[in-house]
Amino acid sequence: MEYCKSCLQTNSRPGILFDKEGICPACNYFKTLKKVDWDKRKRQLDKIVAFGKENRSSDGYDCIIGVSGGKDSLRQAIFVKEILGMNPLLVCLSYPPKQIAQRGVDNLSNLINKGFDCTTIQPAPGVWRDLMHKSFFEYTNWARSTELALFSSVPRMAIAYQIPLIWWGDNPALQIGDLGVMGKNGWDGNNTKNLNTLSGGNYKWMLNKNIKTDNILQYLYPSDKEMERAKLQIVYLGYFWNIWSLRDNGFYAALHGLNLRSDKPWESGDHAGVSSVDEDWVTVNQMIKYLKYGFGKVSEYVNEDIRNKRITRNQGIDLIKKYDGKCSTKYIKSFCDFIGISFDEFWWQVDKSVNYDLFLKKNTGEYQPLFEVGKGN
């Protein structure tokens, strides 16, 4: 494992490619922002807004935004409505009652109460649970199925409502280096289905004798032909903002009523408490990601903070050592109860996916890093 010479991004991230100087794509993109002609980008944005308004649906909506009520969707929704002067339809894929946290319910209500129409999609809880179970034991990633539902729900709704313009947040190719999603330009999001967890929209792995295609319609990403026929254009709105980061969006959202996480960073592996606030099992997945690849949520904060000169690289190393990959046992047990497995079965599966080139197992659920943060192995 190697680290970016500028930030603390690792080359173990799926889809990433460092340049010959050992710099990650996100750092290279960040450098280009100093030379961006923001007036030119504003003109590009104006054309996209015009496209949306010219193709307004019969219901009066000129764009769609996928939302959870969290920091990114709150900031986007307000910007699209108040700055761009558009009339968005918000689309929320809702977690089952046993998964969503009360703060998630409160945050979505906070967003809707700011004057937005919102439609929620609620896949059958039983199928949702069974697919999480299957995702966990096939990929050691319970979100493999739920991510498909999350990202498929918005273009599916856009086709149903005949609203061709979709706003997403940041471009993963530019912000974190997942190059597989890169489209024709920095704002083109029509390759979003190529995200690592979405695998191009592949859903056949979910099927078995009990789960048929008719049971998982909400998990099916529209085909390229369907998107072309509907003239869908997915746009990464973050491309048009010169200040877009986890912290900036978190600060903005907190000032507009966002309910933040109240747990401790050694419980959540999130020292800022502004990400994925609608449920708690994401902390389980971040821990597993850390054991697979050597980085978690704290690394994402730190990398942005280093680029923005909020912290030094050494300060980032200290934060990663303290908190990256941390997860409270209470969240693990809650997740196990939901999908119907024991605590021991959970760690049995996780053990099979740990990268033992990076970690040494000490005890059940206890792993010692074999790498030095910032230097790799």
Image (tube, rainbow, N blue to C red):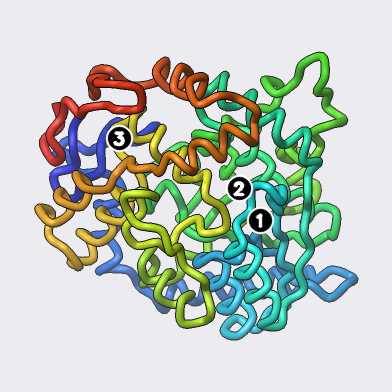
The C terminus: image quadrant: top left
Mark 1 lies on residue: 233
220 to the left or right of 250: right
**Residue 48 visible here:** no
Of residue 353 and residue 76, the one placed in the foreground of this image is 353
CB within 8 Å, label 2 to label 3: no
Q: Residue furthest right?
A: 58
Q: How crowded is mark 3: few (under 14 residues within 10 Å), some or many (20 or more)?
A: some
Q: Where is residue 229 in the image (x, y as percent from the top left)?
A: 80, 46
What residue type is disc 3 on? Leu
- CA gap, disc 2 and disc 3: 21 Å
- Sequence-first tag of 1 and 2: 2
The N terminus: image quadrant: top left
Q: Position of residue 327 (x, y in %)?
A: 39, 42
9 to the left or right of 194: left
Which element is circle 1 on? Answer: strand
Q: Where is residue 102 in the image (x, y as percent from the top left)?
A: 62, 62
Mark identifier at residue 190:
2
What residue type is disc 2 on? Asn
- Sequence-first tag of 3 and 1: 3
- CA gap, disc 1 and disc 2: 6 Å
CB within 8 Å, label 1 to label 2: yes
Mark identifier at residue 17:
3
Of residue 119 and residue 125, the one placed in the foreground of this image is 125
Query: Which residue is drawn at the image coordinates 42% and 46% (left, top)?
Result: 173
The total number of labels drawn is 3
Q: In this view, does 369 lie above or below 218?
A: above
Mark identifier at residue 153:
none
What residue type is disc 1 on? Gln
- Sequence-first tag of 2 and 3: 3
